[in-house]
Image: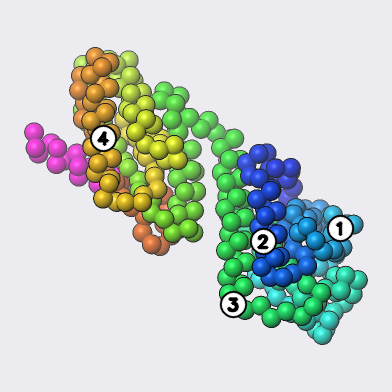
Amino acid sequence: MFETDQWAFSGVDGKISLHKWQKIIDLITGLFSAPSGYIVQATSKGYRVVIKSNEGGSHFETNPILSPHTPLFCKYVVQSNNIVYVNAASKSEAWNTLPEVVEDGVESYLGLPIHWPQGQIFGTLCLKDTKKTSYTDEYFELIEQLRDLIEDDLALINSFEQMREVAMLDALTNIYNRRALILLAQQKLSLAFRLGFDVCCLFIDVNDFKKLNDTCGHEVGDKALIILAVTLKAHLRDADIVGRLGGDEFVAVMQVNDKNKLNGITNKISTEYSKALVKSDICDLSLSIGYSFTESKKQSFETLLNSADQAMYKNKLSKKRDK
C-alpha cells in the first residue's frame, strides 16, 4: 500500500524545489478559501506531511508521522486510489468518528492521490475546512491540474534516480547514450501530452560511414562521429535531447513550435556538419535525416523513433537514386 521512504524530502536531492510545492499548496488553499491544505506522503511507516499550508491546524502539526493504521481521510484516498470528497463529515456516519472530525473539527475534506510515474501511490494532495463546502466541477478540474504539476516533479525525480544506475553519456561522443536517451525522451513525451505541445524526433544517419572506416580507418571514423555530436549540440537548443543510439545513428528530440521551420533546421545541421568535416581534413560526408511528430494521443518514444527511422531510410534511398 505504501511507497517506501526512498527519497528524503529535504529538497529531494536538489532535483525539485519544495518551495514550488509550498506555493502550490498556498495557492490551492487561497483559491478554495480553505483554512488548511497538505501534501501527504504515504510511506512504509505511515503518513507524513511533506508540505502544509501556512495557516490552519490539524493532527499533523503535533504528529508529523502517523501510523498506517490510523483512521484518516488520506488513508481512504490511498486505499481507494481515487478522489475523496466529503462536504459535511459530521452529518455522515461513515466519517463522523474520524479523529480529524471529532478532535480537529474538520467538516469538509477533498483529497486526491498523487502517483509516481509507474502508477504507485506517492501520497495525497488534500484540503480541509471546518465548514461545509460545495465545490463545483471547475474546482475539481483545477486541483487535478495542480496535482499533475506535482506528479511531473515526481517523474523528474524518478528519471534522475534511474539515471544514477547507468552511465548517461556515450563514451565516444559525450552525448546521451541509448538508455539515457530513451528515458529522457519518454519523460518529454509524457510532459508534452500533459501540457499540449508538439515534439519532434530527428533520426540522423551518416551516409557511407562504413566506407569511411574501411578506407580511412576507425580513428577517422570516430572523429567524424564526434564532429557530428558537436554539430548537433551547437545547432540545437540546450533543452533538446541529443543522443547516440549506436554506430553512426544519432537522435534528437525537441519541442516544436513551428513545424515549417524543421527543414531549415535539418539543412543547417547537414551544412554545418560538412563544413566541420572539411575543417578537420575529413572527406565530406552527407547525412540522411528523417523526422516524426507526436500525435494528439499519448504515445511511446519507441513509436516516435520508429517513424523517424522509416522517414530517414526513405531519405537515404532518395539520395541514392539522385546520384
**Mark 3 crowdedness (10 Å alpha carbons): few <14, some 14-19, many ≥20:** few
Does residue 289 show up?
no
Q: Which mark is residue 137?
A: 3
Residue placed at 20% from the left, 45% from the top?
314
Residue placed at 62% from the left, 66% from the top?
143
Residue 311 part of the magenta segment: yes
Q: Are marks 3 and 1 in contact (CB under 8 Å)?
A: no
- Under mark 2, the amino acid is Leu
The relative height of residue 213 versus residue 82 in the rendered view (above or below) is above
**Quadrant where the C terminus lies?**
top left
- Disc number lying in front (2 or 4): 2
- Residue carrying label 1: 61
**Mark 4 crowdedness (10 Å alpha carbons): few <14, some 14-19, many ≥20:** some
Q: Earlier in the sequence, mark 3 or mark 1?
A: 1
Does residue 147 show up?
yes
- Under mark 3, the amino acid is Asp
- Under mark 1, the amino acid is Glu
- Residue carrying label 2: 27
Residue placed at 69% from the left, 48% from the top?
18
Q: Which mark is residue 268?
A: 4
